[in-house]
Amino acid sequence: ISMMAEERLQTKIKRIKVVLRSTNNDWDETLYRLLAKYFGMKVNAGPFTVLALNLPLRIIRKHADKRLQVEALMYGQAGMLEPGAFEKEIYDEYYCSLLAEYRLLRQKYSLKPAEPSIWKFHRLRPVNFPTIRISQFAGLISTGSSLFGILKKCRDTSGLRKILSSAASSYWDNHYTFGSYKKGKEKRTGSTMINVLMINTIIPMLFLYGRETGTDEYCNRALDMLDDIEAEDNRVLREWSESGIRPCSALESQGMIHIREKYCKNRQCLNCPFGSKLISLGGNIDPGNNYMLEDSGNK
C-alpha cells in the first residue's frame, strides 16, 4: 500500500510538472494555481482554475498588503461584481468598497472578468459557497513573501496547518452571499479542507522540489507528512473498510485509492500486487466474493 501511495504521488507530480513548466518554473505561481483548483473542491475546481489563470500572482503581489484590494481583484475577476451576478442589487458597504477598488484595478491592469454563471452554489453547504472560499483564498495568498518559501520551511504538518488555516473577511461572519445577512460565525478553512490542500498540493510540490533540486530531505519530509495526516473518508475507502482493510493515515488511504482507481477499475490485476496474489491462489478463491472488481458490462 505504501508503494502504491508513492506511485500515486508520482502521478500527481507529473501533472504538477506540466503547470510548473507553463509558468517558466515559477514555484509560487504554480502553487497559487494548484491551491486555487483545490479551494474550489470538485464542484468549483474549474471556475477557480479560470480565476487563477485570469489573475496572475504577480498582480496580487503588488497589493498583498491590502486585503480589500486582493479580494476586489479576486471577486472582480470571478465576475461576482458584475451587474446581475446575484439576484438583487447590493448596496452594503463591503460590496460597494470592493466594486470601487475593482473598477480602478480593472482599468489599471486591463482585466477581463469571467462570466459569473460559471460558479456553482447548488447543493453546496453554505460554508463551501465560492463567495466564502474566495475570501479564504485571498487571506492565504495575501502575503508579501513567497508562500512556497514559507511552506518549505515547515518541518511537520502542524506548521502547515497554521499557515493554511485562513479566515474569510469579517463580512462573511454574517453572510454567505453578497447582500444576504444571516447571523453566523467566523468562516475559517476547516481541517478537512486543509488536509485536501496538503495531500494534493503542498506535499506533492515538496516532493517534486526535492526531486528537481536533488534534495532528498524534502522528499522524505513529504512522505513523513503524508503519513502524519489522518486517513481520508470517501466511498472507495469505505469499500476497503468493508473488506476488512482500514487505512491508518493519508499515506495508506492514498495508496488504497490508487489501487482502486488505477488497477481495480481498469482490471489491471496482473500488474497489481493484490491482484496477482489473488490470481496465484487459483481454485482457492471464494467465487462468492467479487474482490472489489468493477463490473465489465459483459453478461
Image (cartoon, rainbow, N blue to C red):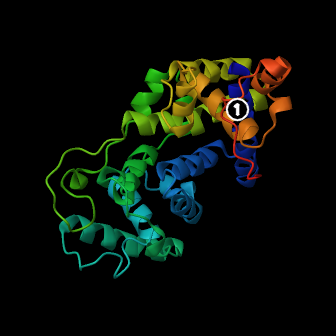
Q: Quadrant of the N terminus?
A: top right
Task: In this rendered view, identify the residue nearer to me: 121 or 267.
Answer: 267
Asked if residue 276 shows in the view, the reply is: yes
Task: In this rendered view, identify the residue nearer to me: 232 or 61.
Answer: 232
- Residue 17 in percent (x, y) is at 75, 44
- Residue 74 falls in image quadrant: bottom left
Q: Residue at x 71, y 23 (%)?
A: 286
Disc 1 residue type (three-letter): Ile
Above or below 125: residue 198: above
Q: Residue at x 46, y 47 (%)?
A: 141
- Decide if residue 185 is on the left or right side of residue 20: left
**Residue at far left of view:** 183
Q: Which residue is mark 1?
A: 259
- Residue 134 in percent (x, y) is at 40, 55
Above or below 275: residue 175: below
- Residue 165 in percent (x, y) is at 38, 36
Graded by Cα atoms within 10 Å as few (under 14), some (14 to 19) or many (20 or more), the crowding at tag 1 reads many
Task: In this rendered view, identify the residue nearer to me: 20 or 228.
Answer: 228
